[in-house]
Structure formats: C-alpha cells, structure tokens
Image (spheres, rainbow, N blue to C red):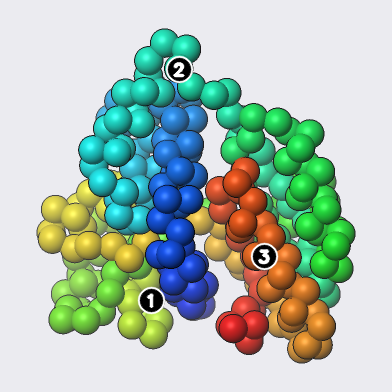
Amino acid sequence: MSGHSKWSTIKRKKEKTDGQRAKIFTKIGREIGVAVRAGGPDPASNSKLRDVIAKAKANNVPNDNIDRIIKKAAGEGGADNYEEIVYEGYGPCGVAVIVETLTDNRNRTAADMRHYFDKYGGNMGQTGSVGFLFNRQGVIAIEMEGLDEEKVMEDALEAGAVDFLTDEDVFDIRTDPNDFTGVCDDLEAKGYTFVSAEVEYVPTTYTRLSNPDDIKNMAKMLEMFEENDDVQNVWHNWENADDAE
C-alpha cells in the first residue's frame, strides 16, 4: 500500500483549472495530438492515446473535441511539431520536482525551466536526478458522496487496481501504468465518474518545508511552471504543499 494520498494536490489543481478551462483543454489537446502522431489515431492500438483520452474525459473535455483533435492530428501535415521533454530538478531544501513539457522550441522551454528553478531557490538537474524518488502509477479519483466504500473498493480491485486509499472526500485508486486505461474503462462501465484520472509520478518519499520563505518560494515556483504554456504536468514531493494556501 502506498499509504499516502495526494488528493489535496489534485483538488487544488482542479480548483485552479476550473477557471482556466480553455487553457487546460488546449494543453490536453496538444497531448492528444502528440500521442496520435507518435502511435496512430486508434486508441485500441495506441496505449498512450488511450491514457490521454482518459485524462481528457476526467477533465470534462467533450467527446466531440477529442474526436476532432484526433482527426486533425491524423491528417496530412496539419499539426505543429511538438516534442515531449521531461525536466528534473530541486526546489528549496531539496524538494524534488519533475516537469513534463510539450514544446516546439526546446531552447526556449529549457531556458524557461532553468529560470524558474534558479529564481526560486532551486536548481535544474540532469535526467534521472530526481526520477528515482518517484514511481509511475495510474491515479483515479472518485468522489465519495453517495457511494459505499466497500463496493467501490471491490469494483476497483476486480478491475485490476493495485491500491485503494481514502483521502478527504475522494476514493483514490492506484493502478499499474500498463493497466490504467483498462481499469478506467471497467469502472466507467460500472457507472463511476472521475474527478481526475492520469498516469502520475507518485513520490516514494516526501520533503517538508518549515521556513516561510521556502514555502513562499516553492509555491511561486510551482505557479510559474503551471502557468507556462509548454508545461503539461508538474510533479513534486513537497509534503506540506497545502501550507502555501
């Protein structure tokens, strides 16, 4: 059992992005396009595309939008040429940070990422410098309200989940990355809807900040990453992130 749910982080992200739906739709659309160009437009044979579609649905991207993006990306010469680049580094006091980006200009993106790390008391590292502090897991969040915990747990484990947690007002279901889409499909077929669903970098250890300046700088660093148009996801092992609220 992972023993530690980061639903508070998921909820904070959701609260922020609810007011920025156009921006989050654009970022997910870009991710769908890259997945289609890398592995084709059929989610049955493109596992990355299946995962992104699950993420899109959890973020309330309409099916029509998803279909339109897939068709556009599959067309001849229509799309911008984005590449996936993952940056790793440390925030204040050694908080580990992983930033997933999609960019059409790697020099611009690298300069931006390095600037954010440096400006707020951290430093950008080499590939693998913090990745060992995280595990890749599918993470599915379902609101508790009106649901029976034992029934949801039973359904999740039958679907292939490897872990089942509760945190605040959600059930937090974990999967092997390769089983993520299958578990999502199975739970959707049983009538569940998701607050969030994504393959994430889940920390294996956490770092707590106590100095108010460190807390302020870490919060600002994360804000700068998340506001950057090239950034798709930011993962970190800051234990008391809610203290910045």
Mark toward the start of the polypeptide (1 vs 3): 1
Q: Quadrant of residue 188?
A: bottom left
Disc sitting over residue 78 in the figure:
2
Residue 225 appears in the rendering: yes
Location of residue 208 in the rendering, given as x and y in whole percent from the top left corner: 71, 82
Location of residue 5 in the rendering, given as x and y in whole percent from the top left corner: 47, 75
Classed neighbour count for the residue bearing mark 1: other residues with Cα under 10 Å, few (<14), some (14–19), many (≥20): some
Q: Amino acid at mark 1?
A: Leu
Q: Which residue is mark 3?
A: 222
Classed neighbour count for the residue bearing mark 2: other residues with Cα under 10 Å, few (<14), some (14–19), many (≥20): few
Mark toward the start of the polypeptide (1 vs 2): 2
Q: Which residue is mark 1?
A: 165
Mark toward the start of the polypeptide (3 vs 2): 2
**Residue at position x 83%, y 53% in the image:** 115
Whether residues under marks 3 and 2 lie with C-beta atoms below 8 angstroms apart, the answer is no
- Quadrant occupied by the N terminus: bottom left
The residue most toward the left is 190
Say what secondary structure mark 3 lies in: helix
Q: Quadrant of residue 197?
A: bottom left
